[in-house]
């Protein structure tokens, strides 16, 4: 069975739809940040495919950095606790920052990052997320650039994993709950 076609996956957004939407987000960022050099902070690991495509859709002299925070671990339930695993290489002070996320779910991860980046005196902080799952929100966070809003389902692909699998799928799919073991 090919990794790209599996019975427990239901495609939500195919590769063409995702690429088209990322081009639109890149154009919007290019317009909104005209004359500036924003720092894009890609949140590891899930936002890597989205970030890689998004930066190439932005026609500005951007800079790029990475941060890693703990989220779901191997399970699909959030612990509600956020921990910094890998910090940025660069200072944010005085910089316009765009946080690049794979998905905003409870909002806990973003709330943590927004708070930290503001304390570090970024000039501005906005968020770009491939997916927004508003139904489970626990913290109110503003997401300026949203790829797609999705219902409350567990999704994989295009960076999103289940137990570290499926990140390389070129599409986003709902993972059949029967294939998900909680823990
Ligand atoms: P919070 O709840 O802090 O979540 O907004 C952000 C992180 O949770 C993970 N997440 C998912 N991962 N499928 C996944 O593969 C999902 O449906 C899902 N929902 C949340 C993800 O790592 C994200 O960065
Ligand atoms: Mg994950």
Image (cartoon, rainbow, N blue to C red):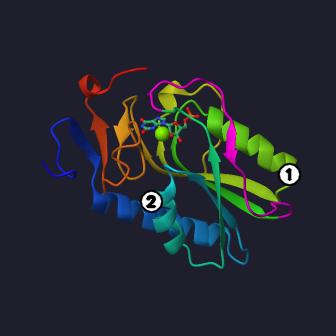
Task: Measuring from the top left, give residue 64's x and y in whole percent.
Answer: 64, 67
Q: Main secondary structure of the magenta part?
A: loop
Q: Is mark 1 within 8 Å of ligand 1?
A: no
Few, some or many C-alpha atoms within 10 Å of disc 1 (few <14, some 14-19, many ≥20)?
few
Tell me if residue 119 comes above or below residue 91 in the rendering.
above
Task: Measuring from the top left, give residue 178's x and y in whole percent.
Answer: 24, 23
Count of marks overlaid on the render:
2
Q: Helix or strand or loop: what does disc 2 sit on?
A: helix
Furthest-top residue in view? 183
Tell me the tag on residue 99. none
Closest to the observer, 98 or 143 = 98
Identify the residue under disc 2: 49
The magenta stretch spans residue 135: no
Residue sitting at 59 percent across and 72 percent down? 30
Residue sitting at 16 percent across and 52 percent down? 2
Left or right side of 138 for 121? right
**Which image quarter: residue 74?**
top left
Query: Closer to the N terminus: mark 2 or mark 1?
Result: 2
Task: Measuring from the top left, give residue 177's x and y in whole percent.
Answer: 29, 25
Q: Helix or strand or loop: what does disc 1 sit on?
A: loop
Q: Is mark 2 within 8 Å of ligand 1?
A: no
Identify the residue under disc 1: 120
**Magenta-drawn segment:** 74-94
Left or right side of 87 for 105? left
Q: CA separation, marks 2 and 1?
A: 27 Å
Closest to the observer, 103 or 91 = 91
């Amino acid at each position: 069975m090919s990794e790209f076609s599996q019975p427990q996956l239901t495609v939500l957004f195919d590769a063409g739809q995702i690429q088209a939407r990322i081009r639109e987000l890149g154009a919007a960022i290019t317009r909104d940040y005209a004359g500036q050099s924003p720092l894009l902070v890609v949140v590891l690991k899930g936002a890597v495919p989205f970030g890689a495509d998004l930066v190439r859709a932005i026609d500005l002299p951007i800079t790029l950095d990475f941060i890693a925070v703990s989220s779901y671990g191997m399970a699909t339930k959030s612990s509600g606790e956020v921990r910094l695993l890998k910090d940025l290489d660069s200072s944010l002070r005085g910089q316009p920052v765009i946080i690049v996320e794979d998905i905003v779910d409870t909002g806990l991860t973003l709330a943590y990052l927004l708070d930290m980046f503001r304390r570090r005196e970024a000039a501005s902080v906005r968020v770009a997320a491939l997916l927004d799952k508003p139904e489970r929100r626990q913290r109110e966070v503003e997401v300026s650039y949203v790829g797609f809003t999705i219902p409350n389902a567990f999704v994989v692909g295009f960076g999103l994993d289940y137990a570290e699998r499926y990140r390389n799928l070129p599409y986003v799919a709902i993972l059949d709950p029967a294939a998900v073991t909680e823990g």
